Each structure stands twice: as C-alpha cells, then as structure tokens.
C-alpha cells in the first residue's frame, strides 16, 4: 500500500513534462508548415555555431523558427532529465521508475531523429520524426496518468455495468487515429494520400462518437470525461480540417483564393496537426483507464472468490466432522 501512495510532487513533474513537450511539438509543426526543416544544413550546430551561441533573437524567418524548435528540444530534454531523476528517487515501483527513464530515452531518440533528418535531408525522416513526436507525447501523458491519484483506486462500475463494447472501441479508436495521423504526415511531408486521409477521417469520427456513447452509459466520470474531451477534440479537428482545406486550395464559390504560406494557412495547418496529436493521446488515455478498471475488477475478484471458496470448504469440513466428534464426546 505504501508503494501505491499518491505522490503530488512526482505527478506534478509528470504533468509539467508532458505540457513542456507541447512547446517543441507546436514549434515543430510550425517548422513543417513553413517548410523550414532545412533552414540549417548542419546539426547539432546552427550555421556552424553552438545551440546557445547562435544569435537566435537576431535571426528571422525560417532560421528563427527552426532554431527555436531546437532550443525547445533542449528544454524538454532538461525537464525530462529532472523527471527521470525524480522517478528513480521518489517512486518505489520499479516499472514506474523505468517509465520515467523511458521518457528521457524517448526524448533523446526524438532529438537524434530530428538531427538525422537534417543531416540526411530526408523528408521521410521528417515524417517519422513527426509521428514519433505524437507517440512520445502520448507516452508522457500516460505516465502522468499512472502517477495520478485515481490510478491506484479507480472508480468501481455501477452494478450491472459491463465494459464489453467499450473494451473493443478503446482498442479500435486509437488504431484508426494513429492511421489517420500517419496519413496526415504523408500529406504534409510527401504531398500524397490526401483523399485517404480525408476518407479515414469519417471512420475515425464514427469510432469516437461510438466510444462517447458507450462510455457515457458507464455512468463513471473517470471514463466519461476523457470520452467527452475526445469528442470535443474531434469536432475541433473536423472544423480545422475543413478550414485548412479552404486555406490550402481556396474556395471558388466564395471567391477565396489560397495564398501559399499565408499566416491563416500556417495557423490552420499547424493547429490541425497538433489537435491530431491530442486525439491520439486522449484515445490512448481512455484505453488505459478502461484497462485499469478491468484489471482491478479481476484482481480484486479473484481473492474474493478464493476467500469464499475457503470459507465454504471450512464450513463443509466442520459440518462433516462435527457430528462424530460430538458423538464421541457424549459417549
């Protein structure tokens, strides 16, 4: 029980780490929208200068955005070091400690991928770099969930409630969303799979709405809240996608002509990417919550069943043996 105690400091550090990761994610999405990934041909230096020696505030345009992305990467690296050290110092559960170390390893790997993308000048690596960013952020958020107050004592489902359909949906929905996010990466980095990306969006929206409906019926706020957040993010994503389409290709009936790399286009496309990442994170978060409730239900059910069996066996034995003993004592 002591090892499962809620530790506010560690939980706060986990939340700060995940929130800080949003900074390089947002700036990285801006880099892609501006097509500024090769503003510098070198790495880890910038035009031959060190990360902190480069006159970032005096730069402009693509160089300002790209170097800002690199500095944001250094920031999340430093925060991840602090979080990993705190996990190994304060957290007695070995697997959680290794999760903290995994966060740091994931950030380092992500930085190396970004550097490899520059050195190889490969758009395919840029796409992989963007996809793994979503996975790293999701992993950070999952560790924060594990360190949260409700993880050790998840709510009990009302009597008669089952998670059968929800268990299927929370597996299917993240898979569809990760496919959708990957197709979006193909659109942004390689200029392909646009219609596949749009078509998969309808499937993803259907999965999310079905998940919301089933989760709401559980009458458990620990499952309802992330389901509603997932649905709200999906609605925002649909609106951003439609607006981004108009900003990218224009809309003749309104007389709107798209302007390449306009502030509106950059903002919409960047926001669409970031919200897509949030959708993946929220879907995995809901999957973990459902899995945790189901695991705790089974784990607590087995001892109860064993205890009940033991009591029944003892009663049976006592009833069988008591009459001869009693009869012997009377004699």
Image (cartoon, grey):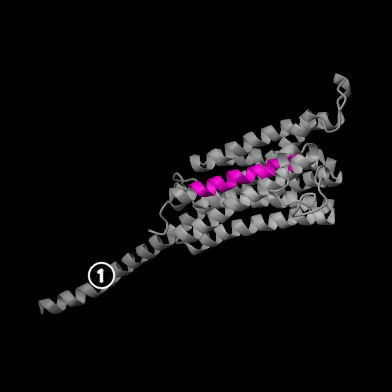
Q: Secondary structure at mark 1?
A: helix
For the point 70% across and 54% down, which residue is it? 111
Is any atom of residue 212 visible in this view?
yes
Of residue 299 and residue 97, the one placed in the foreground of this image is: 97
Q: Which residues are magenta?
A: 12-30
Q: Is residue 124 left or right of residue 235?
A: right
Q: Could you tell me what secondary structure mostly forms the magenta stretch?
A: helix
Q: Where does the image place residue 112, in percent across and percent down from the top left?
A: 72, 57
- From the image, which quarter does the N terminus lie in? bottom left
Q: Which class describes the residues within 10 Å of circle 1: few (<14), some (14-19), or many (20+)?
A: few
Residue for badge 1: 319
Of residue 168 and residue 45, the one placed in the foreground of this image is: 45
Of residue 321 and residue 250, the one placed in the foreground of this image is: 250
Q: Is residue 174 magenta?
A: no
Residue furthest out toward the left:
331
Is any atom of residue 217 visible in this view?
no
Of residue 198 and residue 11, the one placed in the foreground of this image is: 11
- From the image, which quarter does the C terminus lie in? bottom left
């Amino acid at each position: 029980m002591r090892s499962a105690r809620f530790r506010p400091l560690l939980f706060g550090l986990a939340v700060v780490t995940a929130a800080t990761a949003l900074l390089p994610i947002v700036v990285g999405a801006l880099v892609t929208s501006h097509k500024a990934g090769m503003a510098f041909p070198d790495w880890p230096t910038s035009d031959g200068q060190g990360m902190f020696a480069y006159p970032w505030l005096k730069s402009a345009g693509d160089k300002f955005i790209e170097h800002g992305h690199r500095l944001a990467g250094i920031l999340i690296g430093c925060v991840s070091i602090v979080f990993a050290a705190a996990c190994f110092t304060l957290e007695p559960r070995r697997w959680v400690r290794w999760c903290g170390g995994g966060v740091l390893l994931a950030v380092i790997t992500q930085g190396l991928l970004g550097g490899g993308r520059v050195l190889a000048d490969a758009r395919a690596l840029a796409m992989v770099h963007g996809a793994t960013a979503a996975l790293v952020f999701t992993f950070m958020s999952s560790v924060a969930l594990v360190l949260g107050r409700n993880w050790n004592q998840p709510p009990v489902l009302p009597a008669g409630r089952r998670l059968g359909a929800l268990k299927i949906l929370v597996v299917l929905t993240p898979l569809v969303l990760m496919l959708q996010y990957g197709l979006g990466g193909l659109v942004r980095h390689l200029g392909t799979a646009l219609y596949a990306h749009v078509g998969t969006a309808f499937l993803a929206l259907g999965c999310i709405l079905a998940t919301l409906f089933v989760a709401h019926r559980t009458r458990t706020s620990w499952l309802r809240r992330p389901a509603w957040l997932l649905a709200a993010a999906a609605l925002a994503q649909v609106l951003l996608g439609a607006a981004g389409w108009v900003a990218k290709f224009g809309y003749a009936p309104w007389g709107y002509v798209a302007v390449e790399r306009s502030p509106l286009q950059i903002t919409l496309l960047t926001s669409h990417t970031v919200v897509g990442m949030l959708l993946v994170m929220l879907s995995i978060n809901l999957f973990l919550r459902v899995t945790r409730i189901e695991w705790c239900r089974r784990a607590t059910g087995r001892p109860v069943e064993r205890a009940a069996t033991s009591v029944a066996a003892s009663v049976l034995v006592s009833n069988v043996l008591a009459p001869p003993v009693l009869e012997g004592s009377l004699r």
